[in-house]
Image (cartoon, rainbow, N blue to C red):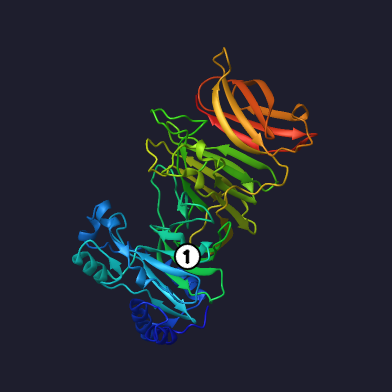
Amino acid sequence: MGKFLPQTALRACLTGIGISLLCCMFMENAVAQGTAFTKTQVLDAARELSKTPFVEPKKVPDALLKLDYSAYRRINYNKRAAIWGGTPTKFSVEMFAPGNLYASGVDIYVVENGKAFPAPVNENSFDTPTKEVAQLLAKVGQLAGFRLHFPLNREDYQDEFIVFQGASYFRAVSKGQTYGLSARGLAIDVAEPTGEEFPIFRKFWIERPSSQADAIVVHALLDSKRVAGAYRFGIYPDDPTRLDIEATLFPRAELKHVGLGALTSMFLFGSIDRSDLPDYREAVYDSTGLAMHTGNGERLWRPLNNPVDLQVSAFMDKNPKGFGLILRDRRAEAFEDEEAGYQTRPSAWVTPMGEWGAGHVQLVEIPTPVETNDNIVAYWRPKTPLAAGQEYTFNYRLSWPNDNPLPQGFGRVRRSAYGHKLGTELPQMVIDYRGLPESIPVKEIALEASVNRGKVTEVVAQDLPDGRMRVFLTFEPAGTGPVEIRLQPKHKGAPIGETWLYRWTG
């Protein structure tokens, strides 16, 4: 943390350095309220919290809950009140107000020189549609979340690059990107018949970096009916932005279905799953597919789908090297949506730090008729349940790149499509690879293809310009139900491109 003391900040305000009066009021108030803070306190708080029954957070007054979307959108944080705004620190913090969908508040603290100070909430903190709303927010005294700013794209402007808001959700961008998919601290019982449990972040502590630092640390206290947890986020805005995450969980009850490194995205339609309704756009999605780097080194690619019925897929593994939801095509003409700009959305890649043991990457695809619904969830599900009364620590790196990392000269799937073989009713998958080794002619590439029901009738490769290879995989399904399809390009017995997987449902 920096050496910019609250008293120093107050003097700087009074001598005209440019720090807002609101910021100075916060600093002056903080001198009296600051309490000692260390990372251990968050761990201790989570441990103690797990020994008591879960208590639902208090809801904000009805007048805030009843604000419609338009009215809530008119509540904006007063930029003159930005924490560390106008100081030598490269980062600044802005807050979100509770209300509308954000039914309860969270406590946010700013940490300076080993002391934690509550973030100020008063009638001047937000620009509001009415004075009554401002008074209510001051009375509640809590916030719905926060966003961090940093000169990510150019040195003379602090871009918003990460947001923590709602349950345990957060999302980030790298240089040149716009917001898309989200991550969350923990997923529990996703797609279970008994319903999903949504953990929340109850408290945050944001450490002030030094004036030279290009990284910032955020701590969070997680709580839910069956688990409490302590989180440390080391946040590095960059190209790509990355988060080094330490998560320590204290289950109140046994957790049989828990999701680590959980990601949430949207897939409405694309080349492999066309829209059922007329739409002028070529595609609508935040992520193209699920990528995975398995513990034994295999690299998988599974295109996403907007299914008719709920679909759950499990990719078994031990000590995975990485997985994520990836946006592959970054051409504007691939989407033809100038307003949404889907081609600028980030991918998200989870790299476990240490051994996560046996389990599987679980992919959940939920039917949706509209693009405003996040209908894709992916996470690591440990094979062994988390026992009550025990302590579990999971460390991982979460980055927000344009694509997942692959070795030089290793083929990636650029596009997947579906149709019928010409003149027949046989289903045919079309898979385009890019980046295969230039020294290997397409005719020398072995294409290993299989289906779990029925038979593969034909696999043909076509050499395309720009170093692409197109594969036509035709199959004949047997019986009823979904068909799991697998294709892997090899040369002399060694994989030279991603293993393509897909669940065909007819």
Residue projecting furthest to the top: 423
| Image quadrant assignment for residue 456 | top right
Mark 1: give few (<14), some (14-19) or many (20+) Cα within 10 Å: few
The image shows residue 417 at horizontal and vertical percentages of 55, 29
- Observer-nearest residue: 178 or 137? 178
Q: Mark 1 points at which residue?
A: 157
Dot 1 lies on which element? strand
The part of the image, by quadrant, that contains residue 115 is: bottom left
Type of the residue with mark 1: Tyr
Q: Is residue 303 above or below residue 85?
A: above
Tell which of 380 and 181 is nearer to you: 181
Q: Is residue 103 visible?
A: yes
The structure residue drawn at horizontal position 61% and vertical position 30%, both measured from the top left corner, is: 431
Q: Whole-percent x and y of residue 354? A: 64, 59
* Residue 412 versus residue 122 in the image, above or below: above
The spot of residue 64 in percent (x, y) is 24, 60
Question: With 250 as the anchor, is 22 left or right in this view?
Answer: left
Q: In the picture shown, does residue 160 fall above or below 122?
A: above
Q: Image point 39% across, 85% down: which residue? A: 10
Left-right relation of 186 to 404: left
Write the residue at 23% across / 61% down: 129
